[in-house]
Image (spheres, helix red, strand yellow):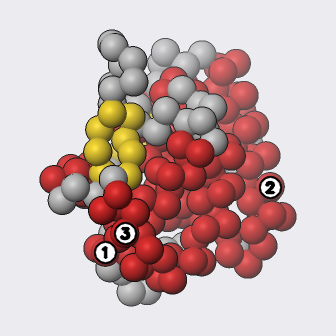
């Protein structure tokens, strides 16, 4: 599978940030990291992002580098709506132009972006960490029973108790089924 071009990835991130923000999301880096992780998986696409389990769940140093580059290129900007919180990431007017030029290259991802935006918009970092890590574990161990995946989540993230881990696994199982139903062939 051919890797999505950098310009198209920029358009993809702009579309994702725009949609998350339109749903009331804080849209920090954690939102984008977790959404891009699941977007790449659901779409079976090659964005060139490798994810590892890190401080707050699945994390890609490539995504971090590209977000930094997009900020330097004036495609994205940091906004600080509340003191004491990390930045909210928003597309700039130039970023919106980049999106318009490359919109046709990312059309196939729009339904998944909408799905993930609905799922993640109201989530805080703690919730995103739990569900994205549960998704990561489920992807690596799809045949394991829910309780086993919850135990693995708890082992990776001891601050997530078993009950919260089971809930995160349940949410992931439900959302994966919902994605197959809603998105059909796109997320097969």
Spatial CA distance of label 2 from label 1 is 30 Å
Asked if residue 110 lies left or right of residue 77, the reply is right
Secondary structure under tag 1 reads: helix
Q: Which residue is mark 1?
A: 7
Is 95 drawn above or below residue 132 in the view shown?
below
Residues packed near mark 2 inside 10 Å, few (<14), some (14 to 19) or many (20 plus): few
Q: Nearer the viewer, residue 55 or 36?
A: 36
Residues tagged 3 and 1 counted as in contact (Cβ below 8 A): no
Residue 174 place in picture, x, y as percent: 79, 46
Residue 63 place in picture, x, y as percent: 31, 54
- Residue 39, by quadrant, is bottom right
Q: Residue furthest bottom?
A: 2
Give the mark nearer the N terminus: 2 vs 3: 3
Q: Which residue is mark 3?
A: 97
Give the mark nearer the N terminus: 3 vs 1: 1
Which image quarter is the N terminus in? bottom left
How many numbered badges does the structure rendering display? 3
Residue 175 visible in this rendered orientation of the protein: yes
Residues tagged 2 and 1 counted as in contact (Cβ below 8 A): no
Q: Which residue is mark 2?
A: 178
Residues packed near mark 3 inside 10 Å, few (<14), some (14 to 19) or many (20 plus): some
Residue 135 place in picture, x, y as percent: 59, 46
Give the mark nearer the N terminus: 2 vs 1: 1
Q: Residue at x 29, y 45 (%)?
A: 77
Spatial CA distance of label 3 from label 1 is 11 Å
Asked if residue 36 lies left or right of residue 185, the reply is left
Residue 12 place in picture, x, y as percent: 44, 66
Residue 120 visible in this rendered orientation of the protein: no
Q: Residue furthest front?
A: 93
């Amino acid at each position: 599978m051919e890797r999505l071009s950098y310009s198209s990835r920029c358009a993809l991130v702009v579309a994702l940030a725009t949609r998350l923000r339109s749903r009331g999301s804080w849209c920090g880096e954690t939102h984008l990291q977790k959404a891009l992780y699941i977007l790449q998986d659901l779409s079976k696409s090659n964005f060139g992002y490798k994810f590892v389990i890190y401080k707050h769940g699945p994390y890609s140093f490539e995504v971090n580098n590209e977000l930094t580059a997009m900020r330097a290129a004036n495609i994205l900007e940091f906004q600080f709506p509340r003191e004491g919180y990390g930045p909210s990431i928003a597309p700039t007017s130039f970023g919106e132009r980049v999106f318009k030029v490359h919109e046709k290259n990312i059309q196939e991802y729009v339904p998944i972006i909408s799905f993930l935006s609905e799922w993640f918009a109201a989530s805080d970092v703690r919730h995103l960490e739990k569900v994205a890590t549960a998704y990561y574990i489920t992807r690596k161990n799809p045949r394991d029973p829910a309780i086993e995946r919850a135990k693995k989540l708890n082992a990776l993230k001891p601050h997530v108790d078993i009950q919260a881990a089971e809930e995160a696994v349940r949410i992931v199982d439900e959302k994966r089924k919902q994605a197959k139903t809603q998105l059909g062939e796109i997320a097969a």
